[in-house]
Image (tube, rainbow, N blue to C red):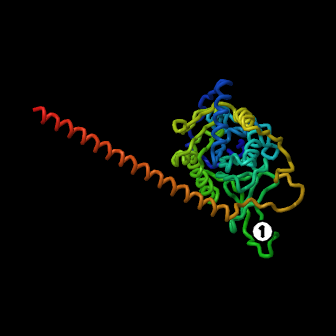
């Protein structure tokens, strides 16, 4: 999310609410809320984290709608003072903490709106992330749809052809020879099918969703955390500005993402590792072709988990409804008997 990326997008007026004032909880309140959130994480079976541009500002990449965001400044005829490129940006404490939480089993999946590639650089595996708006460091074959990791950020936006043919022919005897394009979406593009369906499944199955560094204004990505609430789970929001779904949240923490994640990791007894080029596939020293694709069995497994989860929820909802109706009938029956007894007494007294 830099000026270069924003400048490459097609003109679009509906950019949401810009420049909302930031709010900060007191240090004591942040500590208290982080302890509560860490308890929820320990109790939960399926935690999903939804990340936005706010987690990358520390890396030198500006957000969009913050006080100094790309679009906020654009409205004033200004541009952010960017002093770092996508290629030079490295994952923040938040990115490395999330990777650790995934490795430790506390977080099952990450849904990201970010195209900066910092989750990829942190060493997070493809099976654990949905990149709804694309990635500057991945490219895709327009024919076979396979994705591959790039060593340098693409300079194009909008799934444009990159003048290359699909490298799958180097991996197998028969390659598709399709044309390679960037994966970064423009405004009117459809979200990638596999990423969207995995985000949908995980968000629905989650018993705890954490929205981190996003105002949740862009749909459908901004609505995904609320799927957790639909099926009985909790929603926590960590952001400096108000979000579209604050009223639905069970917990809101107004503080910098890095500070919250640092406290959260301490509560969980985990260390935040430093960024390592050895885990960063964009810094691979050899010329190996690195694929960035979901495994089909993983998608099938998540679909089965989703179907089971929804079925159980509907059954539980039906049982609760029948119990309420049964209780109402018993209450009415008891009320009728009491009224009948009173009427009999009145007749006898008369």
Q: As drawn, is 191 to the left or to the right of 120? A: left
Residue sitting at 55 percent across and 36 percent down?
A: 246
Question: The C terminus appears in which quarter of the rendering?
Answer: top left
Residue 195 spot, x, y in % from top left = 64, 56
- Furthest residue in direction left, as rendered: 350
**Residue 275 visible in this rendered orientation of the protein:** yes
- Furthest residue in direction bottom, as rendered: 173
Question: The N terminus appears in which quarter of the rendering?
Answer: top right
**Residue 80 visible in this rendered orientation of the protein:** no
- Count of marks overlaid on the render: 1
Residue 114 spot, x, y in % from top left = 68, 46
Residue carrying label 1: 168
Crowdedness of circle 1 by 10 Å Cα count: few (<14), some, many (20+)? many
Residue sitting at 15 percent across and 34 percent down?
A: 346
Query: Looking at the picture, does residue 158 appear above or below residue 274?
Result: below
Residue 330 spot, x, y in % from top left = 32, 45
Residue 36 spot, x, y in % from top left = 63, 34
- In depth, the one of 14 and 261 nearer the eye is 261
Residue sitting at 59 percent across and 55 percent down?
A: 201
Quarter holding residue 162? bottom right
- Furthest residue in direction right, as rendered: 285
Mark 1 falls on what kind of element? helix
Query: Looking at the picture, does residue 8 appear above or below residue 77?
Result: below
Quarter holding residue 208? top right
Q: As drawn, is 283 to the left or to the right of 4? A: right
- In depth, the one of 173 and 209 nearer the eye is 209
């Amino acid at each position: 999310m830099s000026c270069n990326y924003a400048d490459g997008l097609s003109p679009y007026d509906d950019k949401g609410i810009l420049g909302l004032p930031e709010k900060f909880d007191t240090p004591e309140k942040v500590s208290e809320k982080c302890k509560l959130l860490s308890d929820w994480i320990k109790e939960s079976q399926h935690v999903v984290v939804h990340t936005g541009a706010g987690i990358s500002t520390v890396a030198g990449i500006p957000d969009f709608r913050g006080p100094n965001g790309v679009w906020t400044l654009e409205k004033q005829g200004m541009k952010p003072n960017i002093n770092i490129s996508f290629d030079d940006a490295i994952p923040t404490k938040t990115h490395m903490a999330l990777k650790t939480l995934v490795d430790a089993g506390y977080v099952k999946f990450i849904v990201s709106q970010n195209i900066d590639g910092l989750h990829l650089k942190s060493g997070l595996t493809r099976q654990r992330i949905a990149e709804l708006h694309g990635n500057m460091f991945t490219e895709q074959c327009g024919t076979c749809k396979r994705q591959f990791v790039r060593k340098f950020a693409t300079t194009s936006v909008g799934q444009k052809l990159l003048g290359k043919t699909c490298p799958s022919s180097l991996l197998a005897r028969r390659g598709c020879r399709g044309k390679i394009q960037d994966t970064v979406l423009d405004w009117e593009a459809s979200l990638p099918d596999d990423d969207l369906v995995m985000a949908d499944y995980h968000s629905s199955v989650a018993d705890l969703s954490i929205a981190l560094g996003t105002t949740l204004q862009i749909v459908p990505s901004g609505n995904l955390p609320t799927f957790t609430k639909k099926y009985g789970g909790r929603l926590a929001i960590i952001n400096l500005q108000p979000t579209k779904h604050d009223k639905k949240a069970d917990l809101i923490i107004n503080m910098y993402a890095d500070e919250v994640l640092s406290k959260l990791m301490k509560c969980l007894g985990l260390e935040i590792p430093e960024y390592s080029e050895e885990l960063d596939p964009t810094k691979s020293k050899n010329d190996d072709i690195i694929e960035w694709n979901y495994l089909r069995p993983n998608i099938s497994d998540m679909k089965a988990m989703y179907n089971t989860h929804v079925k159980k929820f509907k059954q539980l909802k039906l049982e609760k409804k029948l119990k309420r109706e049964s209780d109402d009938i018993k209450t009415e029956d008891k009320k009728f008997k009491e009224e009948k007894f009173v009427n009999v007494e009145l007749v006898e007294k008369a």
